[in-house]
Image: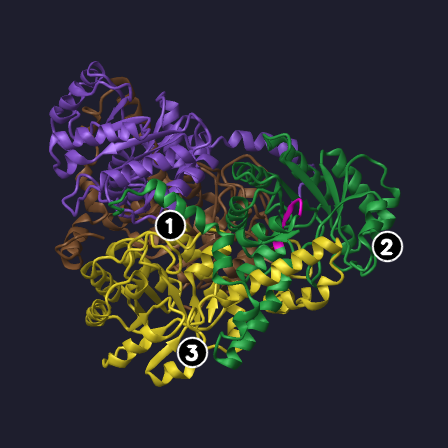
Chain colours: A brown, B purple, C green, D yellow
Amino acid sequence: MEAHSGLSAKIVEEAGFKGIWASGLAISATLGVRDCNEASWTQVLDAVEFMRDASTLPILLDGDSGFGDFNIVRRLILKLEQRGINGVCIEDKLYPKRNSFIECDQKVCDADSFTGKIKAAKDTQKDNDFCVVARLEGFIVGLPFEQVMERAHMYADAGADAILVHSKRTDAEQILAFTDIWDRPTPLVVVPTTYNSTPTDVFAKAGVSLAIWANHNLRTSITAMQDTCRQIYQAQSTLKASENIASVKEVFRLTDMEELAAAEKHYLSGSGAE
Amino acid sequence: MEAHSGLSAKIVEEAGFKGIWASGLAISATLGVRDCNEASWTQVLDAVEFMRDASTLPILLDGDSGFGDFNIVRRLILKLEQRGINGVCIEDKLYPKRNSFIECDQKVCDADSFTGKIKAAKDTQKDNDFCVVARLEGFIVGLPFEQVMERAHMYADAGADAILVHSKRTDAEQILAFTDIWDRPTPLVVVPTTYNSTPTDVFAKAGVSLAIWANHNLRTSITAMQDTCRQIYQAQSTLKASENIASVKEVFRLTDMEELAAAEKHYLSGSGAE
Amino acid sequence: MEAHSGLSAKIVEEAGFKGIWASGLAISATLGVRDCNEASWTQVLDAVEFMRDASTLPILLDGDSGFGDFNIVRRLILKLEQRGINGVCIEDKLYPKRNSFIECDQKVCDADSFTGKIKAAKDTQKDNDFCVVARLEGFIVGLPFEQVMERAHMYADAGADAILVHSKRTDAEQILAFTDIWDRPTPLVVVPTTYNSTPTDVFAKAGVSLAIWANHNLRTSITAMQDTCRQIYQAQSTLKASENIASVKEVFRLTDMEELAAAEKHYLSGSGAE
Amino acid sequence: MEAHSGLSAKIVEEAGFKGIWASGLAISATLGVRDCNEASWTQVLDAVEFMRDASTLPILLDGDSGFGDFNIVRRLILKLEQRGINGVCIEDKLYPKRNSFIECDQKVCDADSFTGKIKAAKDTQKDNDFCVVARLEGFIVGLPFEQVMERAHMYADAGADAILVHSKRTDAEQILAFTDIWDRPTPLVVVPTTYNSTPTDVFAKAGVSLAIWANHNLRTSITAMQDTCRQIYQAQSTLKASENIASVKEVFRLTDMEELAAAEKHYLSGSGAE
């Protein structure tokens, strides 16, 4: 499940999900910038570090196209492991990337240079459990099916721990055509944003290992804030708006204020000055 | 109206509000940390910079107790003005502050040292329109009414552009007792979080210049994310959840993706490689 | 004159120079990373912001190849102007760039995409005095003279405020061949690092407007630290090493500690607690 | 030996020293700000992270007075361990601290609150080898000897891994009076900046475990930059100045550019595009 902040990461964990998708779209939209690498890679790193501290779940960072060449990818892996992030997904597009759902200058990168990034990532990681997911953007930019499949094999050969097949169709045709043929042990990942009318177990039966709900915490918070703003602006009062939203106490519970009160008793002397 | 991110700042602007309260509680809770200066002052600065870029509204930063002494306040003012932030509110508590609504080690600072901070802030600002709001925490920690009032006069004397009277009561008694006596031109600000059952025009009639809706974007987004997470987790599908939340297109609209597409046509040659 | 930190910027100013070259090589080497965009563009921004605060001189940032496409350049300009930086130099190489003096994968970018960056930069700046310098890397990668000249004209046409002609030869032949032909009002900039045996007035007479001493504060501090470390390590004492280095008092003078002592008297009450 | 940047950390390692003192004075002066917590604690963290990446030596961070209360200290420890820093030294002064050698508002904090910080630090660390050094500022602010000694015992009792006895005298009298009495296994650390005429083996014989050369890389680089700036400014040429300073090649060696060239051959395909 997508998260984009420490707070949303905590909420994802409490809801029972097994892992966090640190979405590039959601992180950048929350910052107020476009999902086109307008936030620098270290600004993304800062965001995901707060997510790490707020949740114990595995976190897979949406690493866009790797924020540059193989060498930037190496620095990224170093920094992610220092911060306890568990994996990164990189896609075979040029830097700066464009969000896959917009009508912009969408270009896949050279497949060889992308395998170089995957190898560089795998060679850099120190923790064997760190995961590098290779994301296929071929369907997004309109590459022929065979080329997308060929790239998938190249990326698996290069050491990718999983292949994310991305599609912007409103049906699952591209995805299922792909899973139908894929016969390697490298697991498959899908992101059913546009084609979410296909039941999830269809993908499970097709051999998909992981489905990512990619941006729904972002989107629901937008609607909620728009509604609440509208309501408060009209009423010029928060009385009614406060009825259906989390209490201030709930905010404190989410950041575990109780632990702080207990810690003060433990670590602060009676005299109390700093 | 409270905002805590570039995204929420944009939403506040679109809703028609005249200004943004960059809430310390909301910024820190969004990061996943406690409203006790767990985020460093430069991390808060990073957050408010994204808010600046995403909105044209005046932004008043909740500057807690100033993140240190008068000298840190001077650096803060320098950095806020560079980033185009329009004002800061500082409160007469010790650093690291504790959120005013929690049962923790709440202490006001020496009044003289606080007037030093106000003077330092006013002497540092280069833009005459920059505002320094002095927040009274006396009612929060239980100071006698006279002492709170005396501090208000000292802070106004020191050059504060406005006085924020804070109260955690569920009625407006402390606030109205204060406004009843206050007869100086320095404007008053209130934060009706706990005492929001009092109609806003009561404060207007009592001479209050500004009411801050201090944390409701944060709180509504918490509820929304908790509900959506629960729904998606149970359904193992986003189909139903997607019905009532912002579309991906709305995310793009909020970050003005159209401008980027137009700019690409303008600045990218036909050949297109970076 | 090159600077790479607040401290070196202050020293450059005190020495009498008219402006500061915020060198990408020097900033990255000081951080301990390679001059190949291993530091993110916001990390570079942080470095140059400290330089701004420490010096009143005009600062020209070495902006490498612009840290991405025209859109990243636009964000860069926005951020530089917020921080009071006076100009940026961008070079016609791909991102991530390679330092011009190393035997690595050196590639110029498409000339049209680079003119797009220049136009985007000029359209974005709000202060008319902000300067965008276009740096020619053609000689570095071995382009024919005519192509380098043609690019210079394209960049001037696109609005560049100056053209930086870069060369890694140990003589000034390429530079002087260029200045000999250049007949436009757009001023020329040179970086005599490898060809510094040519007297500076040769360039002045050839019509060059600005010479950049590009990395000598970095290099002299390296030698000094290596020597001092060796000496202290051998002596296991700082007694001798301390004789020829700045005193602690000089460190305080450079950061104007006296002003702080005076400010404490002004802003701190007698009671003194925070 | 002091370091203040990735570059200086690398130089310290190459000189043979066994560990790095990440000096607060040196880090802040390099940034161009005062050693009075003008840099936020996360800005200090950024500096020390670059040092970590550039050197394999143990790094002890000069953590000033802990940047706030016990709770900020807990966050600091968490962040330092994530980044692989090996220890932190905290001093018993108020936040924001003042450099110990300046005539400013110098105040020690309450001893009990400081033991709370030490306990909080030790309880927070996950790696048993992480070190928390407690620095006595009593001699700096003029506390009686007995009170300084009493604090030392309290800090050792609280779990400090070492006691740093600080003095600003030009002789070693205070230090040696202290070591003469100290009979606990908790090791002692000294910083012979002002009293460096006392031979180092005097301290060794007195039972001191560690001497810190606290700011000499900073100070030597200041002198070097001032000299080189003066020379280049007068000559308007770098020819003579370049003779006695590190070559550009040496800069490349220090950041291991050779490894990058080799990696490019390994990870970049012949086709070479990003």
Horizontal and vertical percent position of residue D263: 61, 67
Residue at the spot 71% in from the left edge and 36% down from the top edge: C161
The residue at which mark 1 appears reads as: A21
Residue at the spot 66% in from the left edge and 67% down from the top edge: D246
Q: Chain of mark 3?
A: D
Which one is closest to the eye, mark 2 or mark 3? 3
- Distance between mark 1 and mark 2 Cα atoms: 55 Å
Q: Amino acid at mark 2?
A: Glu
Is A239 placed above or below C44 here? Answer: above
Q: Which mark is residue A119?
A: none
The magenta segment is: C17-24
Horizontal and vertical percent position of residue A232: 26, 23
- Distance between mark 2 and mark 3 Cα atoms: 57 Å
The residue at which mark 3 appears reads as: D198
Q: Secondary structure at mark 3?
A: loop
The residue at which mark 2 appears reads as: C173
In front of the other: C190 or D258:
C190
Answer whether residue D251 is magenta in the image: no
Are the residues flagged by discs 1 and 2 from a single subunit? no
User: Is residue D102 in view?
Assistant: yes
In front of the other: D253 or C200:
C200
Which one is closest to the eye, mark 1 or mark 2? 2
Figure label count: 3
